[in-house]
Image (cartoon, helix red, strand yellow):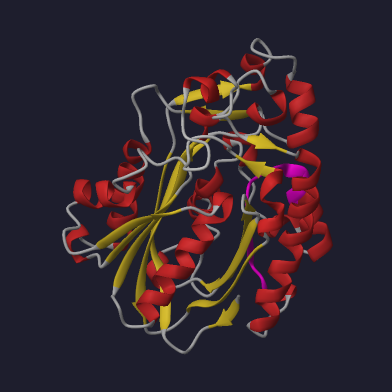
Amino acid sequence: MIGSSNGVGVSITGLGAHVPERVMTNDELSTMMDTSDEWIMERTGIRERRIAAPEEALSDLALPAAKESLEDAGVAAADLDLVIVATVTPDMAFPATGAILADQLGAENAAAYDLSAGCTGFMYAVAQAYGMLAGGLGQRALVVGGDILSRILDWSDRSTAVLFGDGVGAVVLERVAEGGFLGFELGADGSGGQQLYLLAGGSRTPATAESVAERLHFVQMNGREVFKFATRVLVSSAEAVLAECGRTIDDVDVYVPHQANVRIIEYATEKLGIPEDKVVIDVDRYGNTSSGSIPLALADAKREGRLQPGRLVLMTGMGAGLTWGSGLIEWTDGGRG
């Protein structure tokens, strides 16, 4: 699925982010499994990640991020028309964390729901919100991307446990007179679903004493195949959305890839031909936060003064499904860089 703007301007006007207080270093991980700081850094570029406290659910991390984004945009929660939470680790199966968050914020006039597309969830959610606002179904939307992946990791499995962390980012989208999103490219290849999955807990394999004992409630990943998919699709999706919008790599001012692994980012950056100084990387501090990855990186880019009005920002995510998605935005004054 690919498309460019239909002439209706929709932009990010507010940004917020929140991560748990606890920092887990590679050295701490080395006391829990057969690994080391050197091994993790060489293969992933990750040196630490944040871990939610036992009493923290996703909505507890999402609330401060959402409030920050609303304050940044100068928007009252009561004026929101839509709240989407992109996650694979909601507070519970239902009600949706989106509905819980909307209630906590006081967004009493907003439709609210969750969206599950793995690490691509944020890009899918932003594209959905864009479509609804551009189509006239609302004026303002809150999109939250985040996960507490530490709850679904096998902490004895170094092939997965070293990669992930917890965190949330949030953006406010509004209709604007100029600038904003120029286009999106989204896709999925369900045949690759077995490369990255969590087997138990759904209707096919409900939770039982046996499923818990067999450790079926933890992330399973074929690292080699996911790496091959990620390096390919980060490039192809970015190239597709640029072509659809009539832009080139040289036009891009800021590149925000999914923060899965430094090696994947470096490969995509080289293949695309994007200079290193245009790339946002924070995976070394947060690990892979799934749907929180891109909005957390956007928040970092803003703090560094990189999101100035008129700059062209390219975002690309990929993840379980297997899914992928890119968005191209001309940053606006509403984002306040």
Residue 124, position as x, y percentages in the image: 51, 63
Count of picture labels = 0
Which residue is at a point 57% across and 81% down the rendered structure image?
3
Residue 295, position as x, y percentages in the image: 49, 53
Span of residues in magenta: 252-265
In reply to whether residue 257 is colored magenta, the answer given is yes
Note whether 58 is above or below 139 in the view shown. Answer: above
Query: Which image quarter holds the N terminus?
Result: bottom right
In reply to whether residue 253 is colored magenta, the answer given is yes
Q: Between 95 and 184, which is closer to the camera in this rendering?
A: 95
Q: Between 81 and 301, which is closer to the camera in this rendering?
A: 81
Asked whether, in this view, residue 44 is left or right of residue 95, the answer is right
Query: Which quadrant would residue 237 be assigned to in this image?
Result: bottom right
Which residue is at a point 49% across and 28% down the rendered structure image?
151
Q: Between 96 and 275, which is closer to the camera in this rendering?
A: 96
Residue 134, position as x, y percentages in the image: 39, 81
Which residue is at a point 45% across and 73% down the rendered structure image?
332
Residue 133, position as x, y percentages in the image: 36, 76
Note whether 136 is above or below 270 in the view shown. Answer: below
Note whether 335 is above or below 264 in the view shown. Answer: below
Please indicate, yes or no, whether residue 315 appears anywhere in the rendered image: no
Please indicate, yes or no, whether residue 129 appears anywhere in the rendered image: yes
Asked whether, in this view, residue 261 is left or right of residue 126, the answer is right
Q: Between 287 and 303, which is closer to the camera in this rendering?
A: 287
Which residue is at a point 65% across and 75% down the rendered structure image?
241
Query: Which quadrant would residue 25 be assigned to in this image?
Result: top right
